[in-house]
Image (tube, rainbow, N blue to C red):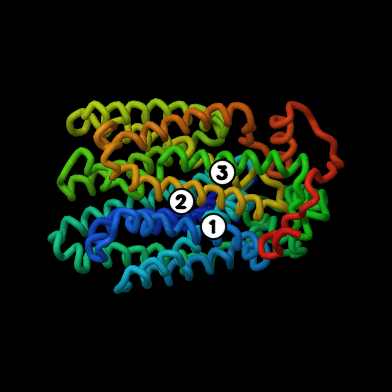
Amino acid sequence: MATNKTHYNLVYLMLCCTVAAFGGLLMGYDSSIISGAIEPLSTYFQLTPAETGWAVSCIMVSSLVGCLIAPKVCDHFGRKRSLAVTAVVFAVSIIGTALAHNFTAFILFRLVGGFAIGLACVISPIYLAELSPSKYRGRTTALYSICCVGGQSVVMLTNFFISKSMTSEVLVDTGWRYILSSALVPCAALLVFIAFIPESPRWSVFKGRDKEAMATLGKISNPEHAKTVYGEIKENIKVDPANIKGKLRLNKKTIPLLIIGIGLAIGNQLSGVNVIQYFGPTLMKNITTDNNTAMFMAFVLAFAQFLGVVVGMGLLDKVGRRKLLLWGALASTICLAYSFGAFYLRFPGVYSVLGLFAFMFLFGITWGQVIWTVLGEIFPMEIRSICVGISVCSLSVANFGVSTTFPIMNSNPYLQEVFHGGFPLLLFSGFSLIMFFFTYRFVPETANVPLERIEAIALRKFYGRDIEEDVQPINAKIISNLGDGIK
């Protein structure tokens, strides 16, 4: 196959990455689909506010398990087959929740969906980062965010049309089941197309499958360049034999990387972006009583983020990860502060949500996609899967906390009386400001840097100097790669 002058077959590369990014589409679709079903579902099962919050956020509990299991799964079976397993688990969850006839069964299958989300959050970004050349890694890993947010936008639109086509009585009786079952379409697409993509060449080298790795690299670039990349991968994997055995030693090298990964993951959720996705219609009912209007406004919010991700895709490699994170944190702080003021002062109509529209758009350009790129590239190969798993696990914990507490804050009579529905937005604005200072101090620039060189750059940023190669563990514990536990 012909390659372009930069030695890359971009058509083949983008096709493979698009299929792998469908894991993000399923994650976005499955996690946000509840937004259109939660109101009629709560009426159908006669849920309390606390139970409503649990119905939404329970997937974050099981996603923790998925995040912890994912490194073991994708290291043992490979990135490609693990994505196929993820799609099957999604399908089981979708069918189970759509057919559930009591709240317990619904929660059980929603937990299964959360497990699949945990798998997808880890496996898809890793595959995209490992398959992509450094020159295009920002754009290819951004496909995960585009699919994730695109899935959220599609599900919001689906929710709107389904709810508009039914009376409120029919929506409560059966309509929410149609909403939930619509997720089977992207799930089937992933299962079909995944058969046509290769395994990650870095995983192939990691497992000693050198011929398989060279074949994949040869399809992405010309033979000479493939040999160069293969040599860099081979050399990098020799760095730390202890880590290659599946152990993560806590030392001066690994702890800073985990601090960066965990900090970015938690900060992403403390912005409140997923609250707006999960509870969009509920949040909009603070300013409108019409259900269809609330549904449509929730779709516009999701679509604003999707447009932001599309616009930002070309900026990741040109502007850089660090600058986008810094500007995104500042923009989030300002937009959320405006939104709080609008709710507090009870601005009429669209003026009350202009800040949220701007927030979702700018978040999509910046944090909505940059975090997944950085998590997929900042850790060295031999500990990448477990470190991404730990970071995404932290993201799920933060997501669970925010999603669980939002319905309680939003329905609290005192907070409603004093802040008029804007109190959560005030908190999210403050957290976004904190993330600006965190990014400024700890997060390095990784754009256009080969994966094998990023670790040294990150450590230099963290410590302000180069550190010695031979680093003694500062913690006697050895964290095994998943199921091995802490020894």
Q: Label 1 belongs to which residue?
A: 64
- Give amino acid for label 3: Thr
Q: In this view, does 107 lie above or below 247?
A: below
Disc 3 secondary structure class: helix
Question: SS for tag 2?
Answer: helix
**413 relative position to 31: left or right:** left
The vertical placement of 49 against 195, above or below, is: above
The quarter of the picture where the C terminus appears is bottom right
Q: Look at mark 2 in the image and give the residue it sits on.
A: 400
Tell me residue 30's x, y (percent): 39, 59
Q: Mark 3 points at which residue?
A: 373
Residue flagged by tag 1: what amino acid is it? Leu
Image coords of residue 163 (percent x, y): 20, 57
396 in relation to 457, above or below: below
Depth check, mark 2 against mark 3: the one in front is: 2
Q: Is residue 227 visible?
A: no
